[in-house]
Each structure stands twice: as C-alpha cells, then as structure tokens.
Amino acid sequence: DANNGNVKWETKLNDFPTLSNLSINLWGDHENKYIILKGDKDLYTINIESGNIVAEKRFDVSFSLGDWGYNTMQFDDNKLTLWDPMGEKVWKYEANSKFYNYDLIKPNAEGLLDNNEVVPTAIVGSKNGVLRAFNMDGGWFGWNILRWSAATGASTSRVWVNSLRAFCL
C-alpha cells in the first residue's frame, strides 16, 4: 500500500515464468484497472485492486514480443500477430519473408499533429527488403491490417520513425 508501505496483495505466477526483458504497463477497461506484465514469452494481466490474474498467455518463441500501446505484437518468423491486453488475438498477418525490426507511429508523435490526425501505425521491416505499415485497428472484419508496403531493395534490419517519417537500413 502506497500510504503505509504494507503489502496490498501477492500474486503467484506460473511455475516457470520467463520474465526477462520485462515490460510493465497499466491498462483499464470501463470497470477495472490492470497491470500488464510482459516478458520474453509471457503475458500476464493482473487486476490492480485484487491481484488476481485475469489473463495469462505463454508464447512458444522467446524474445518475439513487442509493445504496441496496451497491445502485444508477436513476431514469429514471417508471421505478425497483434494480441489485446486480455491475450485475445486481434489480427494476424503472414508475409513471404521473415520480419526483422519495427518502430511505431504514435498519436501526438512529438507534438506535431493533433491526436485525431495520426493513426497508430507499426512500421515493420523484413528480410526480403519490404517495408510494411500496419494499422492497429484492422476495421470491422480485420481486412485493413496492411496500410501500405514498399520494396527497399535490401534487407531492412533497422527501422525507426522520426517526425512521422519512416527510415530503414
């Protein structure tokens, strides 16, 4: 408890949690607030008031997870899957080449544009030299996942975004 330093709750994770490369986020729905713990292959969503684990997901491949807001991006060779904070699949995309690196365009990026003008986008590079931009929200049926793609002519092992422009090496 922040007021007196006493333990408010304790939560036991699975028997063999793999929580290296740990990230911690806070998220809330209309009724509750949660802590999202993400390790190299583990995802836990814990109720902040009770300490109860409300969602738990273990992925097969280590070091394949990335943050996208409250969501989790899973890179598995040539497959990219977006998971919501409760461990439910939002969408999945399969390419013809292995994915390498990514960066994000976030609302209000560097204060350049109004939040309503910037759509959250993941810019992902791949081994075959294709740079792809993905929408977080794929639309009603999840058909609008891929926003655009561009052939760079070489493997894109480094991707970054600056001033709403995507760069790759």
Image: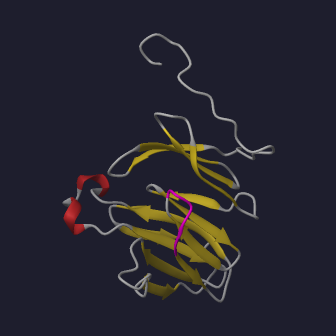
Q: Nearer the viewer, residue 119 or 46?
A: 46
Residue shown at 46%/43% (left/top)?
34
Horizontal arrangement in the rendering, residue 155 relative to residue 165 (left or right): right
Q: Nearer the viewer, residue 90 or 93?
A: 90
Direction from residue 48 to residue 98 in the image, left or right: right
**Magenta: predominant secondary structure element?**
loop
Which residue appears at 59% of the width and 75% of the height? 80
Report x, y in % for residue 128: 65, 85
Q: Is residue 21 above or below residue 148?
A: above
Q: Is residue 138 above or below residue 82?
A: below
**Image point (27%, 67%), residue name:** 118
Q: Position of residue 32 (x, y in %)?
A: 39, 44
| In the displayed structure image, the side of residue 135 where residue 14 appears, left or right | right
Please say whether residue 169 is visible from this viewpoint. no
Q: Quadrant of residue 79?
A: bottom right
Name the outermost residue toward the right: 16
Q: Quadrant of the C terminus?
A: bottom right
Chain part drawn in magenta = 85-90
- Give the image location of residue 154, x and y in percent: 62, 82
Pick the front one: 65 or 83: 83
Specify the color scheme: secondary structure
Q: Residue at x 52, y 58 (%)?
A: 86
Q: How many marks?
A: 0
Q: Is residue 133 part of the magenta span, yes or no?
A: no
Question: Percent x, y for residue 46?
Answer: 54, 43
Q: Residue furthest top?
A: 4
Task: Classify 109 as above or below 16.
Answer: below
* Above or below, 144 relative to 105: below
Q: In the figure, is residue 115 to the left or right of 66?
A: left
Can residue 20 be seen here? yes
Q: Would residue 86 be counted in the magenta stretch? A: yes
